[in-house]
Amino acid sequence: MAEILLTSVINKSIEIAGNLLIQEGTHLYWLKEDIDWIQREMRHIRSYVDNAKTKEAGGDSRVKNLLKDIQQLAGDVEDLLDEFLPKIQQSNKFICFLKTVSLADEFAMEIEKIKRRVIDIDRIRTTYNIIDTDNNNDDCVLWDRRRLFLHADETEVIGLDDDFNMLQAKLLDQDLHYGVVSIVGMPGLGKTTLAKKLYRLVRDQFECSGLVYVSQQPRAGEILLGIAKEVGLTEKKRKENLEDNLRSLLKIKRYVIVLDDIWDVEIWDDLKLVLPECDSKVGSRIIITSRNSNVGRYIGGEFSLHALQALESEKSFELFTKKIFNFDDNINWANASPDLVNIGRSIVGRCGGIPLAIVVTAGMLRARERTEHAWNRVLESMGHKVQDGCAKVLALSYNDLPIASRSCFLYFGLYPEDHEIRAFDLTNMWIAEKLIVVNSGNRREAEDLAEDVLNDLVSRNLIQLAKRTYNGRISSCRIHDLLHSLCLDLAKESNFFHTAHDAFGDPGNVARLRRITFYYDNVMDEFFRSNPKLEKLRVLFCFTKNPSIFSHLAHFDFKLLHTLVVVVPRYLKENVTIPSKFGNMTYLRYLRLEGDIFGKLPNSIVKLTRLETIDIDRHGFIQLPSGVWKSKQLRHLCTDYGQASNNCFSISPFYPNMYSLLPNNLQTLMWIPDKFFEPRLLHRLINLRKLGIRGVSDSTVKILSTFSPVPKVLEVLKLMFSSDPSEQINLSSYPNIVKLHLCVDRTMALKSEAFPPNLVKLTLVYFMVDRYLLAVLKTLPKLRKLKMAACRYNEKKMDLSGEANGYSFPQLEVLHIHYPKGLSEVTCTDDVSMLKLKELLLTGVDSSISLSGRLKKPSI
């Protein structure tokens, strides 16, 4: 796992090299040669480590020890860079010459020590004849087992009946686009089992058929030879000219071929040169299974995809029952005690609906007595036992990730199980930690790359999509419990992070902790009491109910801490308050405080000049000091919209303010009080993408309605009115605003007939909704999601039909109506309006509210 630390070192050396370029002419500039050496040497070592890992997996202790030495080396280099980079960034042409020379000499001496350690590691490797690469790796054993499984008779598809029926219908559809069916999903869902069942049912309807395993490291020649044998190509033709003879045969035959476990598109590019077009008039078909949705999309197009999901609880228990009593039909749950049945259900619940986990668990239980004591023992320890049973299957997906993406995947383990994680948080934390770095130093490019990494993890089915944004991007996601356990195991092995339970032990290892997450208060309190020094810590996550959490943190010197996340539940009996001292966190880049947290961030936060993200959850009540603007790197500032005042927005000639920020940096500003909003804000902050204003007055309405030129990149605008404005708001000149949120303190009419022309999502809270407002909303050409919360409907009936024989809501897909007042009927009477509506949600409604017209269709 040293490759993760090595990647971090490479990323940080890239950043330092960029900083040194602007030091040309100073003594520091000459350190660039040493930085370049680090970057170059670490790249070579990383490639070496990635190669040697297969030998380590085979159980060679010598290789394991060598990799441990490399991991410690990488950690020490990262520590050196983390301490050196801030000094480089602080250096400028006014720095004392003697201080510059001292800094450069000190760093050069440390690099010499690193070079000697690299030489010594190579000496150990050669002296003790450590052979660290081997083609006969342990994964091959797993692949051979998969080949055996592919041709085994068992084709159990319990819980997959609906999937099977849909796939069968699609496979036999004469108009199937491209003739490809792609079964995709996370490891262990039963993709191969389903493909085998489907193949065996339909193969007699084709002239020839084949079932072949592709694997993670495929060879096109072996796969084509396997297909040739399966479809009946003679041995002579297989030896003479395999590719041409196979293509000639398949061109005149109606075939069905299963390609099981395709990992990437490159192997398909080779195979398709031999396989004829399967959507020809002949009607041939190809069935593929893959963990990566993008592979299926590439081969067969979007329509080919069939994504498997985890089993529901009853289907899970049915599969479990089948596997438990597989060898004795005379024994079933009727012979078992009710307590044993309940324990069985608890065990199945721990498997999270993953067939592989259920089968592994059932296999463990078959070897034990059917007693409550024996099964309870399994239940108590099954987390690691099931993980061990599924480890090779799951770990293959992790090892297939690009090295730079592995640490991003492990980051999901910092959150508790089943936690919904915002994409905004993940991508900004990855960047803050330098897990995502671009050579140009362009932050926007880094954000795009981080989004690409997250999309790739979702496409590989390692991460589950929870919500999408108004424009189709990932809003939030989750990780399955099995993969969450994999994250914990891999992170502990690599020292990437530790949980509270595994952080205790050797004081030396504790002192080297880089990241730690706490899910439970009692362990957290004990850990902080036992470990007064955590100088290497980079990331701290606290999910806690402890009201004194910040008092704990104030006693530590977190000199290298990059990321701090504190999450407390809402409605605690005792308030969580922030003390006047916040601890030494000079290098903090990402701060998120979520839940019922009260108080004011202390003035010591003004020292945090590297802060990139300050994210205060809306349920807290936290004030920021004016010195927050000293951080020239600030890109996202999200504060509580309920604050009556916030000193950080005050304009003073004695303190920096938001207008002192570099114009290219700030992207998110939530929520600025109305009295501090000025036209120059939009003129100066040219990259502002999200803006929220609270207490909106007539003057702000006028500024927004007449402002010119309009901000080019502003995408999200949220306005909270404190009173009924006399001015009519006009946002028609904002072509890039795609999300608009309007809220008032009390019910009032919305004085606007001019919305942004490209609006995609609109939220209205506490407004009066009448026919005149609806007439405007119906004509918005790109509106896809409309949410109306606690709005009043004086006309009682809301008619969503087209106006004057026209159509309404041409692109609307989602309509949410929450806690309506005075509404008795929602109707749409014509056949040309809301043709794309997919979801109509009414919550907090009176049971007498009726839906009429097209809205009564069951598809809505």
Image (cartoon, helix red, strand yellow):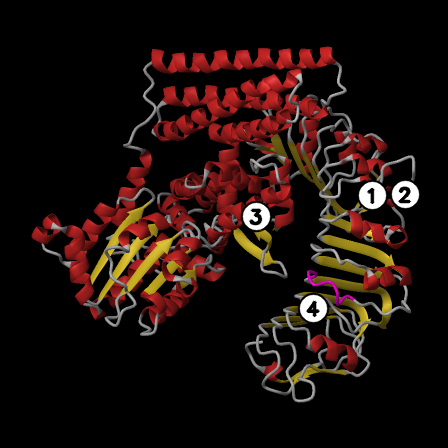
In this rendered view, identify the residue nearer to me: 817 or 333. Answer: 817
* Mark 1 and mark 2: Cα distance apart in space: 9 Å
Q: Are marks 2 and 4 in contact (CB under 8 Å)?
A: no
Q: Helix, strand or loop at disc 4?
A: loop
Q: Is residue 732 magenta?
A: yes
User: What type is the residue that disc 1 sits on?
Assistant: Tyr
For label 3, the residue is 451
By secondary structure, the bulk of the magenta-drawn segment is best described as loop
**Residue at image point 73% right, 40% down:** 634
**Relative image position of residue 57 (x, y in whole percent):** 37, 30
For label 2, the residue is 651
**Mark toward the viewer: 1 or 2:** 1
Res. 186 visible in picture: yes
For label 1, the residue is 659
Quick one: label 1 or label 2, which is nearer the N terminus? 2
User: What type is the residue that disc 3 sits on?
Assistant: Glu
Q: Helix, strand or loop at disc 2?
A: loop
Left or right side of 278 for 569: right
User: What type is the residue that disc 2 sits on?
Assistant: Ile
Q: Which residues are magenta?
A: 731-737
For label 4, the residue is 757
